[in-house]
Amino acid sequence: MRLLIREALQAFRRAPLLSALSITTIGFSLYAVGLFGLVAVNLREALRTVEQRVEVVAYLLRGTPPETIAQASQDIAAFPEVARVTFVSEDEALKRARLELVEFRDAYRDLSVNPLPASLEIQLKDGFRDAQHTAVVASRLRGYGFIDDVRFGREWIEKLDRLRNIAGLVGLTIGLAFAAVAVVIIGVTIRITVLQRAREIAIMRLVGATNSFIRGPFLLEGMLKGLLGGFLAIALCYGTYLLFRGQVELATSGIVFLKPAQVGLGVIFGVLIGLGGSLVSVGRHLRNV
Amino acid sequence: MIRFSHVYKDYPKGSALKKVSLHIAKGEFVFLTGHSGAGKSTMLKLLYGELRPTSGQLRVSGFSIGDLSPDEIPRLRRRLGIIFQDFRLLEDRTAEENVAFALEVTGARPDSISAKVMRVLTQVGLAAKAQAYPQELSGGEQQRVAIARALVNDPTILIADEPTGNLDERATRGVFQLIREINAGGTAVVMATHDLDLVKQTTYRTVELREGTVVFDSGVDEGAEAEEA
């Protein structure tokens, strides 16, 4: 084991330029994947922010007793899709309208009777903010006798659904393409390392080294390069994130960085590519010599 | 120790060895001579399992070369010492590290390696240059390091492919003398060479190859053959 680690580390010392080049190549290949991940994560974040605005508004018939509303609010809050129910009284609705609808401020000021109905604003839980679930909740609400009308912006939600599906599909395709390119580039880099040490491998075989003995240091070296390349990619991604953080605004929030689990996954991806690339390259070389 | 029985070796471009039958006894010294392309290197490569016979039987140190499994190749090579005209040293390791490497790959105990390495480096007269890198050594010295590496696993057979081919006369004498001493210690030596002066200096058995066929064998030693059988 000590020999394995020593041989793997010495490979860096003996060919520092090639090692640095492989790590940089792995780093930049993973950086491309990471950048794409960053864009995907932020798009999803932006979509999520927009989604949070999805709500169902149930307008109540005038004169509904407060206790009926309170009871119904409790029932509705217990729906599996529902996160929160907010009661908006007639007065509150008017106050909001005066505040938000500036163009109609004059019209609202001179009213002797409040024309706006009271309503229940229903926020949905994550994962239920699509057209199908919203429609189900809306139709259930219509079953209450004191609910006059239910609005939820069907078209808008359907568009959001489509956007979400397209983003998911495009994201998956491009993500896989980027990952495949990274795998190929990293594989070639590792192959160069193996070829550069073909003479050493031949000598190892001549003095009686087993294939697994020869393979060991290469695999460890490949994993180490993958790990260092992964760290480099994360550092580059973070640098890019810092550069753009102050300049890009998405929806209501600024851009976000990858979550620790996603960073960890990226580094593990690097290590696995390093390991897999070495396994394939050394294996093929040993079969051919 | 080594027995070729009707061995043929064909390459896509033609035959390299034709019907070679040869027996080399324990501790024997055999010169393989012949022009370039006569089949000397093919014979040596067969001995250390780099090539397999196309037909015929070849047994080396208890292994049947035609039936070697991948696991057996390293085991065979650990019983052999192999040296080449171009030394085949690792340029980025010192003489000591080059020799130690051959022990390390066999899984030798780390605490036993250093003493063994110094023993063989002393035997080849290079103890003082243990820390030198190959490029800091003369050709003769580099070949001595290669010999030390070949000896460190106490081989029963030393296979030498033109070991003096790159050396000047003085270095050639030194290296050849060393190989003779190794043979005197009981290790069989199979040495391919172009250097007929070297061959004439001794009475060792000489096997001459021409176009893949043994055309001359100075020492068909029936007695040794019977003993081995």
Image (cartoon, coloured by chain):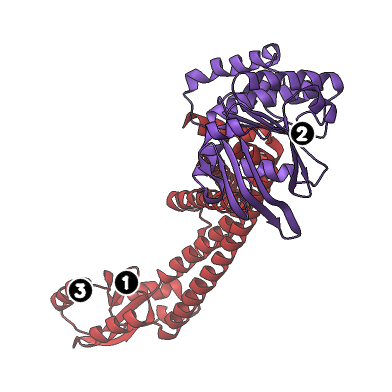
Chain colours: A red, B purple
Whichever of labels 1 and 3 marks the residue nearer the N terminus, that label is 3
Which mark is nearer the camera, 1 or 3?
A: 1
Q: Name the residue under label 3.
A: A73
**Looking at the picture, which amino acid does disc 3 mark?**
Ser
**Quadrant of the image containing the N terminus of chain B:** top right
Q: Which residue lies furthest to the top in this view?
A: B128
Q: Do the residues labelled 1 and 2 touch (CB within 8 Å)?
A: no
Residue situated in front as seen by the camera: A135 or B69: B69
Q: What element carries label 1?
A: strand
Residue situated in front as seen by the camera: A289 or A112: A289
Give the answer, above or below, for where B74 lies relative to A163: above
Q: What element carries label 3?
A: helix
Q: Distance between the residues labelled 2 and 3?
A: 97 Å
Q: Mark 2 points at which residue?
A: B162
**Looking at the picture, which amino acid does disc 1 mark?**
Leu
Horizontal side of residue A123 vs B198, given as left or right: left
Asked if both marks, 1 and 2, belong to the same chain, the answer given is no
**Looking at the picture, which amino acid does disc 2 mark?**
Glu
Q: Which mark is residue A124?
A: 1
Residue B28, x across and y down, in percent:
63, 28
Asked if both marks, 2 and 3, belong to the same chain, the answer given is no
Q: Mark 2 lies on which chain?
A: B
Q: How far apart are marks 1 and 2 (CA)?
A: 84 Å
Please indicate, yes or no, whether residue A214 appears anywhere in the rendered image: yes
Give the answer, above or below, for where A82 lies relative to B150: below
Asked if both marks, 1 and 3, belong to the same chain, the answer given is yes
